[in-house]
Amino acid sequence: MNLPRTRWLLPIASTFALIGCALQSHPTVMAAGHERAALWDEIGVARAERLPRLDLAALLGTQWLRPGGGATLVLRTWSGAPSLAATLFDGRRGAAGVAAAQARYRHTVAVLESSVRTAAQDVENALADRVSATDRLMDMGLQPRARIRSHEARPLFHPPEYS
């Protein structure tokens, strides 16, 4: 029996690299990854809102004086002052904001994992369909030879006087 030559297959490492590249560029995975990054930053913002605030204020002013019709006198003044503001009692509002941001982040990570699983399944299905199509093409190449051999072998199993 003449078996067809083995088809060309990607090495295992290349197959995993192909799947990884396909997953990284999958639109659903990319969108979920961006959402995860945004919510990670939101946790940082919620934590920063609990810290004291340091504000710097500056004032720059110019006055023009013309005393008694003489020369103009220009006075330039400036002032700057820092201010520190902190909330002493917020009723755990800040901690609740951090906890809520962390919960939204955990939810987004779960959505990301789900979208990666779905995209991986899509990629695996596409690769399996490609292998199946290659197998069908190889089988189609064998069919004419099988028909000829079957036609040649028919008299051996079905003598002409009984057909």
Image: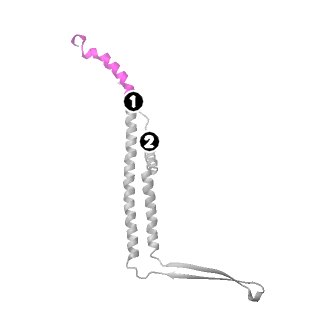
In the image, farthest residue toward the bottom: 68
Whether 25 is drawn above or below 44: the answer is above
Left or right: 66, with 26 as reference point: right
Q: Residue 138 got which mark?
A: 1
Mark nearer the viewer, 2 or 1:
1
Quarter occupied by residue 103: bottom left
Please check the rendered image and state whether residue 145 is part of the magenta-colored stretch, yes or no.
Answer: yes
- Tag 1, which secondary structure? helix
- Image coordinates for residue 160, horizontal then vertical, percent: 25, 11
The residue depicted at 43 percent of the width and 64 percent of the height is 39
* Separation of residues labelled 2 and 1 (CA atoms): 20 Å
Give the magenta range.
139-162
Q: Nearer the viewer, residue 159 or 65?
A: 65
Q: Is residue 88 magenta?
A: no
Residue at point 40%, 63% (across, down): 105
Q: Image height check: is 31 above or below 16? A: below
Q: Which mark is residue 11?
A: 2
Circle 1 residues within 10 Å: few <14, some 14–19, many ≥20:
some
Residue 7: quarter of image = top left
